[in-house]
Image (spheres, coloured by chain):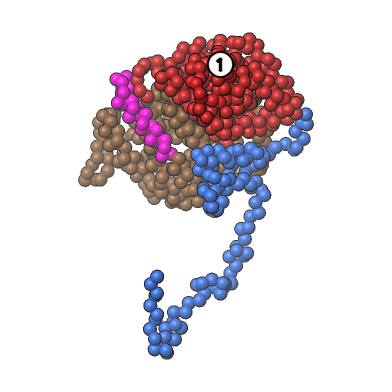
Chain colours: A blue, B brown, C red
Amino acid sequence: MRPKSTPAPVLEAWEVFRQEKDGDPMRHGGSVMAPDAELATHYAREMYGRRQESVRLWVVRRSDVHDLDDGDLLQPPLDRSFKKPGGYVMRDKLAAARAQSGQAKPKARSK
Amino acid sequence: MPDEYRTAVLRFVEMHANSELMGVLPEREWLMRAPTLRRKLALTAKVQDEVGHAQLLYRVAEDLGKPRETMFDDLLAGKTKFHNVFHYPTVGWADVGMIAWLVDAAAIVAQQALRDSSYAPYARTMRKICWEESVHIMHGRDVVVTMVTGSTAQRAAIQDALDRWWGPLMQMHGPRSPREKDRDLHWRIKAKTSEELRQEFLTIYVPRIRELGLVIPDPDLRYDETAGEWRYAEPDWDELRTVVTNHGPMSQARLEFRRLAREETRWVRESILGVPRAA
Amino acid sequence: MTATAAPPATALAELLRSMADDEFVIGFSDSEWTGIAPLLEEDVAMSSLAQDELGHAAALYGLLGELTGTDPDALAYDREPPEYRHCRLLDHGRGDWAMTIARRFLYDTADVIRLEALAEGSWAPLADLVGKLVREERYHRMHAGAWLDRLARSEGEPRDRLLAALIVLAPDAATVFTPIEGEAELVAAHVMDAPMTELEGRWRASIAPVFGDLDLPMPPPATDPERGRLNHGADFDWLWGEFTSIRRADPGATW
């Protein structure tokens, strides 16, 4: 028999993602403490699947998750409205164009 | 996160977690004695959920920086507390029904208000917990209604259980305290005052208790239409203080039970489960 | 698949009773870990295993109830201790974590062999139920196997405790395969595909690789095999006293 040759086990957090039904995205459910992937998966099933409430689970060691929480990268300060719909407000310009062409705003087409 | 906020959230969540864990003990001895297969399944599932809730809540507290083992140390040393109702004995199956119905109901009134807690991980956990708790109350009420419509001995046992549990239930949400002095309200960790929770509990459950023909052991209990609130005999706040400082009838016995059980399984944690990675 | 002739009722009842009692009794010792398991997550896991067992017991008592015209709760609760037919392996108390894992591993691996021998049986109600039980039992074997492996491979206290547990359980390890009264008729009627002694052989073959790999002693033949489901002892008498206490205090009441 090969005895346990791995280093002493460490109890650590594993994040659990779950899928409610086929086609749904994986959503974060919570976390479990476990020493390895096999027991972490078992415990994830218990905490997030014992009531048949999930059709799929992902279990990831928290320390394997690469966390990006940097305001300079995710919320940089300069204007980026040219990348968003809110950056293209044309109401006044359209009103001027219609006034110039003598036409009313087109009615919305009924489907 | 301001230090005062972090400290307040941790204390609040830790006591909640402790209560779920200690709450298992009054019921677990009845797992063995449940009188039908269905009741046994229901009670096992309920108690399992309580352990599950403890896991969810200790995880929230752990992620705030306090290791689980330290929280257990503090609970057993009496440095942190658990809710009053779990310091009392259960003497029969009627108690099992009464706890599952009314104690869980009083707890849910508080827990529903916590679903909007300012601390998002706690709020998310509370939403999951509330969803799971709704079944427990139904199980409890079913046990009570079955006994109330059963034999003379069963009816008497239910009334006796109500007589013993009413006091602790009325104390459970805590003494009235002014809104402006409550730091947990200030931080929006919780949203309602003790009195608001107690009033809500009475409004929902007094009619449901009385419709079973049960007598609530408080002759002063009545609804004051003018004031728009329930009047009741002042709960024994001395009893509450005595009990939550671990001088209740079962406080020491239950803590000792936990202490012994923890020692018994220490070898499993230290060898196979592993020492928790430092936060 | 339907039987061409009705299966022998007495032997079938004995089989169902033994299976239902096994699942009922093991559920007690497993649920004793509620609130006090080594880890909160493990506590929830053990509780699921106990609920599964109880659910299986309820389904088997249900089938036995249909066969004998008896209420399932009456079958589970209203017999005297000598009338219970669970195997002696399950009379051993909860013990420590190693004892619980050893007992679960021995029982779950034996139970799956028994279930597989019934899965294609000629009596449809049992074959159908067995099909469902087998799917649920996979999870149990995964858990027991994962822990047996970890205990056996951890030199020192975990392995020592596991070996000590296996020694205590050894005389009763194979009692799941105690011959059922009238089983020859069940085999002849194709309800089960082989007698218990043959199933025991299959079980030993199934666990030998695991035990070999982990350098654990194989369980010996059961001592007193014919009486492997009798003589439950003082521990069971006490347990019976507990689980019947409420019903006996108010006989006939509805709970």
| Residue B160 lies in the magenta-colored region | yes
Q: Position of residue C176 (x, y in %)?
A: 60, 19
Placement of the N terminus of chain A among the 4 image quadrants: top right
Q: Is residue C229 left or right of residue B183?
A: right
Q: Which residue is mark 1?
A: C185
Q: Is residue B247 left or right of residue C194?
A: left
Can you say whether C51 is above or below A20 in the image? above
Q: Is residue B57 left or right of residue B89?
A: right
Q: Position of residue C151 (x, y in %)?
A: 69, 29
Question: Type of residue at label 1?
Answer: Glu
- Quarter holding residue B112: top left
The residue drawn where x is 56% and y is 16% is C185
Q: Which residues are magenta?
A: B133-162
Q: What secondary structure is marked by label 1?
A: helix
Q: Which of C29/A103 is in front?
A: A103
- Quarter holding residue B107: top left
Placement of the C terminus of chain A among the 4 image quadrants: bottom left
Q: Position of residue C214 (x, y in %)?
A: 74, 28
Report the chain holding disc 1.
C
Q: Main secondary structure of the magenta part?
A: helix
Q: Which of B241/C232 is in front?
A: C232
The residue drawn where x is 48% and y is 17% is C9
- Residue extending farthest to the front is C4
Crowdedness near tag 1: few (<14), some (14–19) or many (≥20) residues, C-alpha within 10 Å: some
The residue drawn where x is 59% and y is 10% is C227
Residue C2 visible (yes or no)? yes
| Residue B68 lies in the magenta-colored region | no
Q: Position of residue C246 (x, y in %)?
A: 41, 19
How many marks do you count on the picture?
A: 1
Residue B253 visible (yes or no)? no
